[in-house]
């Protein structure tokens, strides 16, 4: 199975680096350095995916099936 990838749009803004994950609204972060920003985006993305996963499983109820979908 292929590992999904996500694209980040990043830019320097004064003394900060800021960025957004294109594919998931609301996943954004900042960092003092480019590397810190990327690490922060990874953490924010992982947290958003886990929260979405929990919400989906809760909405599905007890009897559900998980199916891998590739774009």
Image (spheres, grey):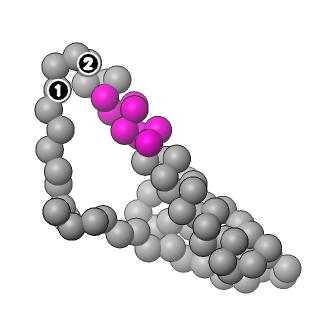
**Residue 53 located within the stretch drawn in magenta:** yes
Q: CA distance from mark 1 to mark 2?
A: 7 Å
Instruction: Name the residue: 32% across, 24% down.
Output: 59
Above or below 49: residue 62:
above
Above or below 50: residue 8:
below
In percent of width and height, residue 42 lies at 54, 62
Image-based side of 68 in relation to 52, left or right: left
List the single residue furthest toward the right.
15
Q: Label 2 belongs to which residue?
A: 61
Quadrant in which residue 13 is drawn: bottom right
**Residue 14 located within the stretch drawn in magenta:** no
In percent of width and height, residue 3 lies at 28, 65
Q: Residues within 10 Å of mark 1 (few under 14, many from 20)?
A: few
> Which region is colored magenta?
50-57
Residue 25 shows in the view: no
Q: Label 1 belongs to which residue?
A: 64
Quadrant in which residue 38 is drawn: bottom right
Q: Residues within 10 Å of mark 2 (few under 14, many from 20)?
A: few
In percent of width and height, residue 14 lies at 84, 81
Above or below 65: residue 2:
below
In this orientation, which residue lies closer to the viewer: 66 or 22?
66
Q: Secondary structure at mark 2?
A: loop
Instruction: Name the residue: 68% across, 80% down.
Output: 34
Instruction: Name the residue: 73% across, 83% down.
Output: 12
């Amino acid at each position: 199975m292929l590992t999904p990838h996500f694209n980040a749009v990043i830019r320097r803004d004064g003394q900060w680096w800021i960025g957004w994950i294109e594919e998931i609204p609301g996943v954004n972060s900042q960092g003092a350095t480019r590397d810190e920003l990327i690490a922060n985006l990874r953490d924010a993305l992982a947290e958003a995916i886990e929260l979405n996963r929990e919400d989906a499983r809760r909405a599905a109820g007890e009897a559900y099936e998980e199916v891998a979908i590739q774009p």
